[in-house]
Amino acid sequence: MFYVAYVIGSAEMEFKTGERDVNRFEGKVALVSGAASGIGRETAKRFAAEGAKVMMADMNANGLVETAAMITSETGQVVFDAADRSQCLNIVSETIKQFGQLDVLCNIAGFAMSKHFTDVTPEQWSKMVDVNLNSVFHVSQAAMPHLLETKGNIVNMASSAGLGGQAYNSAYCATKGAVVMLSKALAVEYAGRGVRVNAVCPGGVATPLTDKFEAPEDADMSLMARLFPLMDMAQPEEIAGAVAYLASPEARFVTGDAFAIDGGQVAS
């Protein structure tokens, strides 16, 4: 291990490098939505493994119970509908009620839909916006006063679909692109007040969400081929690792980033 000390004005800042802290979140509280399966489940497990108390939220009550059974540290569970503002606010209040603080917010709940643009119904569009975008806004807004107290941070789950256009994914791209820009806007607004905000942008990930993926009828497969990364699909544990890094003190100088973890999908 070695130390690097920087002097900024009259304040000296000392950083340790060369050693990973396996308890980076000791004494911290993380709220993870979408924790019943996939990336959300692995993220909850990762924070717990690194010392955090974890409040888990999802609409799938049975999935939350299964996730909790995989964790030995203190956890809490809240069943919520991400499309309902009052329930979004409630998962924050329940976190504070049970744990007394909030240090990390991970907005991971969401869903995907692949359709020809002209086949997307107003109801499907509205649900996509409510779950993938509005929930991020509502939960983050409720959490921000508490994150200001702890100098905490937010990690939002966006997508490679938020960084580049994808055929038959118009609604999904629109919501995930908005999550990226919401994250950047909040990062700028709160940088001077000690709260960091970042977005993770995965490509293909082996989760129940992708297991259910179906291309629309008569899809142009040459357009679909652009969605496949240069490597195999990522595992949810790998995405959870990126979330944990961005939420950790190691990423103290990272804010407003849209971190692509997609096997090179959006590199060209």
Image (cartoon, rainbow, N blue to C red):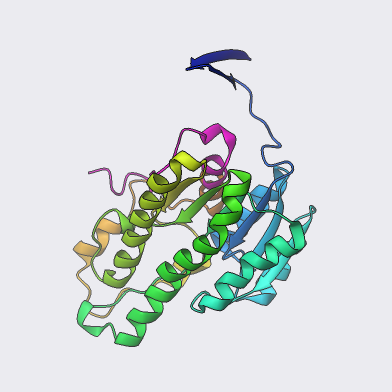
Q: Nearer the viewer, residue 8 or 265?
A: 8
Q: Nearer the viewer, residue 108 or 138?
A: 138
In the image, is 100 to the left or to the right of 231? Answer: right
Q: Quadrant of residue 249?
A: top right
The location of residue 233, given as percent across then percent down, is 43, 53
Residue drawn at (56%, 66%), measured in percent from left and top? 34
The location of residue 8, given as percent across then percent down, is 48, 18
Q: Is residue 263 magenta?
A: yes
Q: Up-down: is 21 above or below 37?
A: above
Q: Up-down: is 180 above or below 136?
A: above
Residue drawn at (41%, 46%), measured in percent from left and top? 187
Q: Up-down: is 124 above or below 92?
A: below
* Range shown magenta: 243-268
Q: Nearer the viewer, residue 243 or 28?
A: 28
Q: Is residue 43 magenta?
A: no
In this rendering, does residue 97 appear at all?
Answer: yes
The C terminus is located in which quarter?
top left
Q: Up-down: is 150 above or below 177?
A: above
Residue drawn at (58%, 43%), measured in percent from left and top? 151
